[in-house]
C-alpha cells in the first residue's frame, strides 16, 4: 500500500521530516504538535508515549491532529500473528495511519497475517530492515538483503533503515522496490546529519530530540526541511 496521505502532506509542507515523539507529557506533546503543524507532515509516536498516556488518552489527543499529520505508531512489533493483529486493531481505533514492525519474526504465522490484517484496516506497514545503533550490526545487519527481499515481496508501504549508516541506506535503496519508501532514524544525538539519508536514497528522515529538545523547534524544523530540499534538488541534477 502506498501511504498517499504521507506523500501528500509532505508535498504541501515541503518537508521530509517525520517527528519522533517519545515524550510523556500531554501538554508538551500538544504544544509541539500545534507549533510545528505548518512544517512537519508526519509524527511517529513511540512506545514511551503510548505506554505513559495510554491508548485512550492518546486517541483524544490525536483526534485533534489526524487531518494535519500522518500518524505513525512506532510499536516495533515482534510477536506471533494473533497478538500483533490485536495490537494493530487498537492502533486503528486511535486513528493511526501506519505502524512499524520488525522483520525478523518471519512470514509464516507472523508477517503475512499481520500485513493482511493491516491492509484490511487500511493501515500502512513499515518493516525494520536495519537499525541505527551499533548493536544493530550484530544480528540484524547480516540479514539486510533477506529482509529487503521480504519487504519487496509483501504488500507494505516501506522500510526503516538507519541515517547513522548512509551506506546501508544507499544499499537498501538499490535493492528495495522503487514504489516502497525508506524512513531513516538516527539524526542528531545518534550521529546522522540532516539531509544525508535523503541524499543516499531515503524518502523521509525520522527526527526526535534534535527538534523536541531544541530551544526553537520551529526554526530548527524549517532549517532541516530546507537542507532536505537542497539535498533532493542536488540529487536530481
Ligand atoms: P532521536 O531522538 O534519536 O529519536 O532522533 C529517534 C527515534 O527513532 C527511533 N529509532 C529507530 N526506529 N529503527 C527504528 O525503527 C531504528 O534503527 C531506530 N533508531 C531509532 C527511536 O525509537 C526514536 O523514537
Image: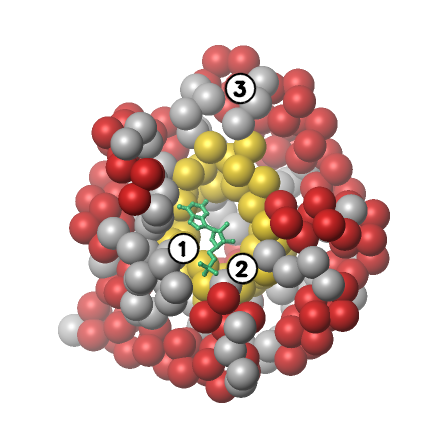
Is there a contact, CB below 8 Å, between mark 1 and mark 2?
A: yes
Dot 2 falls on a residue whose secondary structure is strand
Point 28% across, 32% down: residue = 138
Query: Residue 38: x, y in percent?
Result: 59, 79
Say if residue 81 shows up in the picture: yes
Dot 3 falls on a residue whose secondary structure is helix
Depth check, mark 3 against mark 2: the one in front is 2
Kindly identify which residue carries mark 2: 20
Between the C-alphas of marks 3 and 2, the distance is: 26 Å
Point 44% across, 37% down: residue = 127
* Left or right position of 227 against 206: left
* Left or right position of 171 against 232: left
Q: Quadrant of residue 120?
A: top right
Point 26% across, 43% down: residue = 172
Q: Quadrant of the C terminus?
A: bottom left
Kindly identify which residue carries mark 1: 185
Point 25% across, 52% down: residue = 165
Badge number at residue 110: 3
Say if residue 161 shows up in the picture: no
Is there a contact, CB below 8 Å, between mark 1 and mark 3?
A: no
For the residue pair 50 and 70, the one nearer the viewer reads as 50
Residue occupying the far left of the picture? 237
Amino acid at each position: 500500500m502506498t501511504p498517499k496521505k504521507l506523500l501528500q502532506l509532505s508535498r504541501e509542507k515541503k518537508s521530509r521530516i517525520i517527528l519522533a515523539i517519545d515524550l510523556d507529557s500531554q501538554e508538551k506533546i500538544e504544544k509541539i504538535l500545534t507549533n510545528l503543524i505548518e512544517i512537519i507532515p508526519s509524527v511517529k509516536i513511540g512506545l514511551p508515549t503510548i505506554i505513559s498516556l495510554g491508548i485512550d488518552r492518546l486517541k483524544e489527543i490525536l483526534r485533534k491532529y489526524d487531518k494535519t499529520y500522518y500518524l505513525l505508531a512506532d510499536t516495533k512489533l515482534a510477536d506471533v500473528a494473533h497478538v500483533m493483529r490485536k495490537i494493530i486493531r487498537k492502533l486503528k481505533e486511535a486513528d493511526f495511519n501506519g505502524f512499524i514492525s520488525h522483520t525478523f519474526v518471519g512470514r509464516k504465522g507472523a508477517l503475512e497475517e499481520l500485513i493482511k490484517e493491516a491492509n484490511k484496516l487500511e493501515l500502512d506497514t513499515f518493516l525494520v530492515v536495519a537499525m541505527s545503533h551499533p548493536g544493530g550490526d550484530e544480528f540484524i545487519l547480516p540479514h539486510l538483503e533477506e529482509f529487503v527481499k521480504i519487504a519487496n515481496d509483501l504488500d507494505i508501504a516501506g522500510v526503516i533503515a538507519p541515517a547513522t549508516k548512509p551506506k546501508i541506506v544507499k544499499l537498501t535503496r538499490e535493492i528495495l522496490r522503487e514504489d516502497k519508501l525508506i524512513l531513516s532514524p538516527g539524526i542528531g544525538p545518534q550521529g546522522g546529519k540532516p539531509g544525508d539519508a535523503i541524499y543516499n536514497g531515503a524518502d523521509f528522515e525520522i527526527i526526535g530530540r534534535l527538534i523536541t529538545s531544541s530551544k526553537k523547534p520551529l526554526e530548527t524544523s524549517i532549517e532541516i526541511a530546507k537542507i532536505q530540499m537542497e539535498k533532493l534538488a542536488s540529487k536530481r541534477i
